[in-house]
Amino acid sequence: MSDLYGWMQMYTRRLISKVIVRPVSSEMPVKSYSIPYRLGGLVLILLLLLIFNFKTAAAQQGQGDTGRYMVVTNTFTQYSWQLISRSSSQVLCLVNINHEGYPLLAEALAVCENALYPQAVQTSATQTPVPTNTPAPLSDVMDNTYWRFLEKREVTQTQKIPVPPIVINIVGNDTPTLKPFVTISAYEPFSDYKITAIKGDVGGTPFECQAASCDVLPGGDSTITYWAVSSFGDESPPYSATIRIIKADNNFKTTVTENENFGVYHDICANVWGNTPEFDNRNWSSFPQMPQEIATYHRLYHLAGELIRNDQVDASSCPYGGLFADGSPNSCGMEAAMPKVVEWQNHFDPAIWSAARDIGIPPVVLKSVIEQESQFWPASTRFVMYEYGLAQINEQGADVALRWDSALYDLICDNMMMVCKNLYASMSPASQAVLRGGLVSWLDADCPNCEFGISPQRAEQSMRMVAQVLRANCYQTSYLYQKYTTGASYEDSWKFTMVSYHGGYQCLADAIVSTLTQQQVLTWTNLSSHLGSCPDARDYVDNFWARLSSFQPNQSAVIQSRPVIEVRTPTPAPTPTLPPNPRARNGHVQVIVYMDYNNDYVLGDDELVDNIGVTVKYEDGSSETKTAVKGIATFVFSNQLKGSRVTIIIPQVYRNLEMTVPDDGNIFVLVRLIPPGLPGKLP
């Protein structure tokens, strides 16, 4: 086993960047168990890793499920080798590579495993961690084979690489202003490109803003359609929203009551664990409307040291160039680097936000993991174990992900052109090692030919996979709950998942067993004292939790200067029936009641409160009571004096609101309710 994994660890990265495999031609004399690998080899992984080095990349709008993709074309020299059995002189398999010299051992195993180890494939159907048989050392098997060169040819390969979708959203304004407005902001997760414009129409009147964020003045209650344009060469889908304007004392507030682009977010891990997130003051567990809200301003010393060392910060005026002998910044260097540190730690926010939304992980959790692991400097480390990318994921982390995330397993199999008929846990150790190598190579942001030796673009492209690895650990935690018939609170379940992420399956399993054996309740306080097999896991989780729980949503970007687009829509002249009293008004009162479950101050379709009683009392003593249907209750009145008091009462939640009849007679009230908190202890 040590022989097999020794060379596999050494050559995995070269395998991913070198090998191109092709099945043996039907004309060749091969045994019936010849390798069932599909045409094309590992080119997709190669292209993913080198995507930004090719000048022939062309951006196009996709037609498939992804919606966006980049077409990359690469021409290279391909060398074909046959692996021959010395004993039978038969062709075992064909290996196509794109480098001179003999195929590497790892390349041979990736293509010829079934021929070299026909007895190694297992048939277990379980996806739980199970031991696997140890194959004979590859060096012994290869002694009975030799390579025969077949041909050399030029190959042109074209691949479609998925690109994350444009992020765009619209938000209202709760601060009283002289004119009502909504803010539309868009982000391009693909940092080599940018948002060039925001377009739309208000009530049929078009508008365009040459910026990534702008304020739109709708002029009145209206329906707005909006979309973004990217330098990538495409546009986001158009979305519609309904805008309501509230006027009070010559000031305005705007509310987005319906937003086609507003999806209901659920923490997938909470669903997996079978519990519900508590939203009271837990800013980290809610989902922000836009990436800018997860911006942080932390003093990150490791990141500062890397930025100074790689000439991204000029600290020449500081003692010793701003760095101590160990590479960490001194106080002068830290101050010089701070603006760049803030810029760099928020560079990946759109990619983090987009990946978290797609995978179902709280984006603040994902960002906090990256900050703790790498401080947003994605260089791979090789101190004790090989760890790759922004989240410093090693082969152990890749193993967990491939066991528990079938979609990720299929993706890696497809991109390595392997026919994976069995579950990952049922494969031979050699095949598992090849797949782990494929996953960590996708996460690897090292780029010797890039500026400062890393590729931020590569790191961005890996973000979705980092979120999938984190989600896989949620599934592993849930499996342990089921195995030992136990469970824990939402917060403690996240802490246990971070034990799994940092220390692995056995670390968490041993701690759970020890805690339950002592007949203790499964809480973090109790379990953390049973981490004897991985003693550093407690400090890791506590440090992570301190960072997570101190997070506060960033609102500074909301008040920054933005282009203002005033949209004037033609409206027909009103033809009201004048009441007998010049001060009397006819109109209506519309009340919308919603429960703000995710505490984001935005009305979601699933948050409207149904069947709640609403009473409206007028100053003349008349009143009317209705039951809200899907959160909306509408009252029509006549001959109420302008400026007279209107009281809106919602007795079930002890809410009394007072308004005055405006000049146009129309009153709109949006009532936001907050979910009640549960007591810490039951009586």
Image: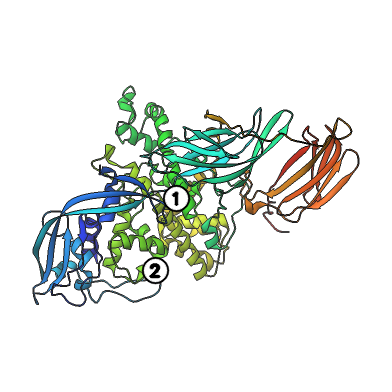
The front one of 376 and 520 is: 376
Q: Kindly identify the residue that appears in the image at 40 percent across and 64 percent down.
A: 406
**Residue denoted by label 2:** 129
The tag earlier along the polypeptide, 1 or 2, is 2
Quick check: 96 left or right of 381?
left
- Tell me where residue 148 appears, x and y as whole percent: 8, 65
The front one of 475 and 69 is: 69
**Residue denoted by label 1:** 355
- Tell me where residue 23 appears, x and y as whole percent: 21, 67
Q: Residue lying furthest top in this view?
A: 317
Quick check: 89 left or right of 111?
left
Give the number of the mark in front: 1 or 2.
1
- Tell me where residue 576 appears, x and y as whole percent: 79, 36
Q: Kindly identify the residue that appears in the image at 70 percent across and 36 percent down.
A: 246
Q: Amino acid at mark 2?
A: Pro
The front one of 290 and 599 is: 290
The front one of 223 and 419 is: 223
Question: Which mark, residue 267?
Answer: none
Q: Kindly identify the residue that appears in the image at 34 percent across and 43 percent down.
A: 457
Q: With respect to residue 13, does 558 lie above or below?
A: above
Residue 324 appearing in the image: no
Q: Kindly identify the residue that appears in the image at 46 percent across and 48 percent down.
A: 354
Check the picture and name the quadrant holding the N terminus. bottom left
Which corner quadrant of the image does residue 64 belong to? Answer: bottom left
